DNA sequence: TATAAAGGCATC
DNA sequence: ATGCCTTTATAC
């Protein structure tokens, strides 16, 4: 044993604090301690947290006494050094506490602690007579609920400091912390069938097949063996176990399998099922690239000689995916890992199925909605750099946090999607931008793909910061759709409107349906949620906690606020004018569905929006019903535009383009162009040109014209000029501060003072303070201040200065209770 | 005067 | 974040 050194560790905790905390290492842990291990530490009064060790040293803190580490959770580091540097980079860039980054990065299962779960020890004999009253209560409760966290236990027992009590139970081996159990999480297992070792040679198998084919009664057994060989392959004595269930699904009889096992030809064993079901390996052949795709691929690869990031622009159906697949294949072959970022919504679509057909076991899907065990499984496999599994991770935003060891390529599909930006909890990061940063950490390349690139990316490409590759031809020879406008102003004059439908659109719907094709109708969600309103005076009830109008939910017949939990039943009498004539007003997807079913009663209508896709399979079921042509008209929100490819859509209708063209913020036109183009792209089939009808009161609007002309470039260049003139991204970086407090006057005063401080430093780059569109949410008043910084300004210095200024601001005692939310590169 | 809600503060 | 201790509001 070496001499007794006293070690200390610096630890980050998953709480919104930017500092690290120093703990003392008990001597017996000296040998086990390592950087980037997880530990359980006491924090505050009687709380336990999971932290991550970032530094081991021997400097005892001078001004306080360090507490001891309670427990070490890992034997090997849970995150990599690179990952930690990435976290720190991100924390600085987005001005978010490192604890917030840790929180966003780790799957929930990795940070159980304060809410440490307790279970009854499997070896407990059930003898309760020796227990104290309190201990007895804990065990009783655990027998009912199986797992309880410390907080729940404290509520049940009715005392706050339950630490000693739990400790005693732990020492007596009566209970167990769930970490100890769940850390060795149990993967799903299943019965697998495999050819017995003795029969794994061509000659023996052939002999046996001959034997089987001689008798009719053994036909089923022959079928089983053939299926096993077909599904599992048979190369040089190597066999793959096949899930018995899937054999049964494929028509293999259980009794035949049992007979074969009795004869010693097969063996059944329980193995771990990878949660990512790999598909049919029959589609093993990789796609053959078209001339245009090959050219694009070559261009991408040669761009990578000089540039780290390449923007691949290709319209819907131009076959970007095949190019991705080819690039992925090459990188996987070289033994490196690949990260493929897709917008959240695309994860439920055909894309995943296609990719799994090519990459089978090597693909892992990472998604914040997966259960924590599955995420933990992928995390571990990626961390171990397992040569066979999860070499390619397809994931939403949060997959940038995986512990890659040897990343060889990052692809960001639909890079313009605003859902890459995380708004709500800090860190407010943009996964597309962070993907590029991550690639830099690995000195590797990023590919951004889009039909309608973000203006920022396009400009970066124009300036030569990114490589640029354009894929023009439509892969499947499908023509671009014909886009027409329904002039709503004109039709209103002509009195030919039927509710929100123009005659032009209705006529076209009828015609398309008559030809046996399908229709998609798109309605923007924002601004179209129904409200409850008085017909006489226009009054509609507001939320008591927020400056918003309540939304009417027809299904449940309640008025709900979208910003808090407030809800009431619809009132019958108008409090403003006393009339009883209150009704629903709005033209959300639900109303569109109702109205259309009245106009076209024989048409089968489906609706795809948040409500109808809330349950797990709603989304998929709708997609399938539409694919199987059980639905003629699909009405939907943004969802119908993203990542779906349908084969029989003859017409797409955009019900209200004008709402999108309200210039509420500097990105409004960009979003409108992207959305309209994307929706339009759903129209068209293999052999026939699709049609798109945009309902608008302003058919001459330049953005609509660019959509009609399919002219992204000219749209983008127009927009870029605007951005330059008005100091917006990509020429200026935006940092938005939101001040928040219950006291309206205090926020006002605070915002004024903070903006004054900012202006002393940044002068005319500071805008505001202004009230946001919704000035009060959940009884908190809001004020916004916007800072526009030249792109080429030293980011780090700016952030440092901002930290100084916020410190200065909060040094005014009066302003201390104000919440300050900092959003770097807001969407 | 008792009790509850709200604000302030440190956490290693 | 979150518990704790203080101040402050408010019910009795
Ligand atoms: Zn509200
Ligand atoms: Zn009224």
Image (cartoon, coloured by chain):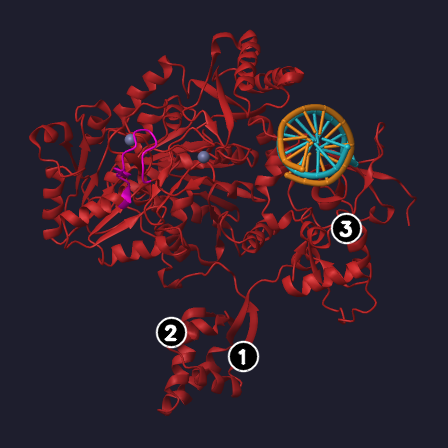
Chain colours: A red, B cyan, C orange
Residue at mark 2 shares a chain with residue at mark 1: yes
Q: Secondary structure at mark 1?
A: strand
Q: Are marks 2 and 3 in contact (CB under 8 Å)?
A: no
Q: Which residue is depicted at the point 40% across and 29% down?
A: A467
Mark 1 and mark 3: Cα distance apart in space:
51 Å
What residue does disc 1 label?
A267
What residue does disc 3 label?
A162
Left/right of residue A270 with respect to residue A26 in the rendered view = left
Quadrant for ligand 1 reads top left
Q: Provide the chain ID for the residue under circle 3.
A: A
Rendered location of residue A237, percent (x, y): 51, 72
Q: Secondary structure at mark 2?
A: loop
Q: Nearer the viewer, residue A725 or A166?
A: A166
Q: Is residue A797 above or below residue A1?
A: above
Q: Is residue A354 above or below residue A207?
A: above
Rendered location of residue A227, percent (x, y): 40, 75
What residue does disc 2 label?
A250
């Amino acid at each position: 044993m070496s001499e007794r050194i006293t070690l200390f560790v610096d630890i980050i905790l998953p709480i919104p604090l930017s500092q690290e905390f120093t703990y003392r290492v008990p001597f017996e842990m000296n040998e086990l301690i390592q950087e980037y291990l997880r530990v359980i530490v006491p924090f505050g009064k009687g709380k336990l947290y999971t932290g991550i060790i970032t530094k081991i040293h021997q400097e005892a803190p001078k001004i306080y006494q360090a507490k001891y580490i309670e427990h070490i959770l890992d034997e090997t580091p849970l995150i990599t050094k690179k990952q930690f540097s990435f976290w720190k980079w991100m924390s600085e860039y987005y001005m978010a506490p490192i604890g917030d980054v840790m929180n966003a990065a780790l799957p929930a299962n990795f940070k159980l602690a304060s809410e440490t779960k307790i279970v009854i020890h499997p070896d407990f004999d059930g003898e309760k007579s020796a227990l104290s009253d309190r201990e007895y209560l804990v065990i009783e409760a655990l027998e009912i609920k199986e797992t309880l966290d410390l907080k729940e236990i404290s509520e049940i027992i009715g005392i706050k400091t339950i630490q000693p009590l739990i400790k005693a139970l732990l020492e007596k081996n009566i209970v167990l912390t769930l970490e100890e159990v769940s850390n060795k999480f149990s993967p799903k297992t299943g019965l697998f069938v495999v050819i017995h070792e003795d029969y794994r040679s061509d000659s023996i198998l052939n002999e046996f097949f001959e034997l089987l084919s001689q008798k009719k009664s053994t036909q089923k057994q022959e079928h089983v063996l053939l299926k096993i060989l077909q599904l599992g392959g048979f190369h040089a004595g190597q066999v793959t176990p096949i899930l018995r269930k899937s054999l049964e699904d494929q028509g293999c009889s259980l009794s035949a399998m049992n007979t074969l096992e009795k004869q010693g030809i097969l063996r059944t064993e329980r193995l771990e099922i990878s949660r990512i079901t790999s598909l049919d390996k029959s589609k093993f052949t990789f796609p053959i690239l078209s001339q245009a795709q090959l050219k694009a691929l070559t261009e991408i690869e040669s761009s990578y000689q000089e540039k780290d990031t390449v923007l691949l622009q290709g319209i819907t159906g131009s076959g970007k995916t095949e190019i991705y697949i080819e690039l992925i294949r090459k990188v996987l072959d070289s033994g490196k890992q690949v990260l493929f970022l897709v917008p959240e919504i695309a994860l439920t679509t055909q894309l995943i199925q296609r990719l799994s057909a090519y990459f089978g076991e090597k693909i892992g899907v990472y998604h914040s909605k997966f259960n924590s065990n599955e995420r933990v499984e992928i995390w571990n496999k990626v961390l171990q750099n397992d040569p066979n599994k999860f070499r390619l991770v397809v994931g939403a935003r949060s997959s940038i946090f995986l512990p890659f060891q040897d990343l060889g390529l990052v692809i960001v599909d639909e890079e313009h999607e605003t859902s890459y930006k995380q708004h709500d909890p800090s860190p407010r990061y943009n996964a597309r931008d962070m993907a590029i940063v991550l690639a830099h950490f690995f000195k590797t390349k990023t590919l951004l793909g889009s039909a309608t690139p973000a203006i920022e990316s396009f400009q970066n490409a124009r300036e030569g910061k990114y490589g640029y590759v354009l894929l023009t031809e439509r892969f499947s020879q499908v023509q671009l759709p014909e886009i027409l406008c329904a002039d709503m102003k004109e039709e209103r004059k002509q009195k030919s409107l039927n509710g929100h439908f123009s005659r032009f659109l209705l006529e076209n719907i009828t015609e398309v349906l008559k030809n046996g094709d399908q229709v998609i109708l798109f309605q923007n969600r924002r601004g179209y949620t129904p409200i409850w309103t008085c017909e006489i005076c226009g009054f509609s009830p507001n939320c008591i906690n927020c400056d918003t109008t309540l939304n009417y939910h027809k299904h449940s017949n309640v008025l709900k606020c979208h910003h808090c939990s407030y809800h009431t039943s619809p009132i019958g009498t108008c409090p403003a004018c006393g009339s009883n004539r209150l009704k629903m007003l709005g033209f959300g997807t639900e109303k569109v569905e109702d109205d259309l079913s009245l106009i076209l009663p024989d048409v089968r209508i489906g609706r795809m929006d948040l409500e109808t896709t809330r349950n797990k399979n709603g989304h998929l079921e709708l997609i399938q019903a539409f694919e199987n042509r059980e639905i003629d008209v699909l009405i939907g929100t943004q969802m119908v535009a993203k990542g779906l490819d349908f084969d029989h859509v003859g017409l797409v209708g955009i019900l209200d383009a004008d709402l999108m063209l309200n210039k509420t913020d500097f990105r409004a036109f960009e979003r409108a162009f992207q959305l309209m183009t994307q929706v339009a792209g759903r129209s068209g089939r293999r052999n026939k040109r699709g049609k798109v009808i945009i309902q608008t009161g302003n058919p001459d609007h330049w953005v609509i014209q660019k959509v009609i002309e399919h002219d992204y470039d000219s749209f983008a260049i127009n927009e870029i000029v605007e951005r330059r003139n008005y100091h917006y991204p990509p020429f200026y970086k935006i940092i938005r501060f939101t001040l928040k407090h219950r006291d309206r006057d205090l926020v006002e005063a605070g915002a004024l003072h903070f903006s004054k401080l900012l202006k002393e430093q940044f002068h005319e780059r500071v805008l505001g303070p202004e009230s946001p569109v919704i000035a009060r949410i959940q009884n908190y008043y809001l004020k916004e201040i916007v800072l526009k910084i030249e792109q080429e300004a030293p980011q780090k210095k700016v952030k440092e200065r901002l930290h100084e200024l916020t410190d200065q601001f909060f040094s005014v005692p009066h302003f201390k209770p104000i919440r300050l939310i900092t959003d770097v590169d807001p969407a």
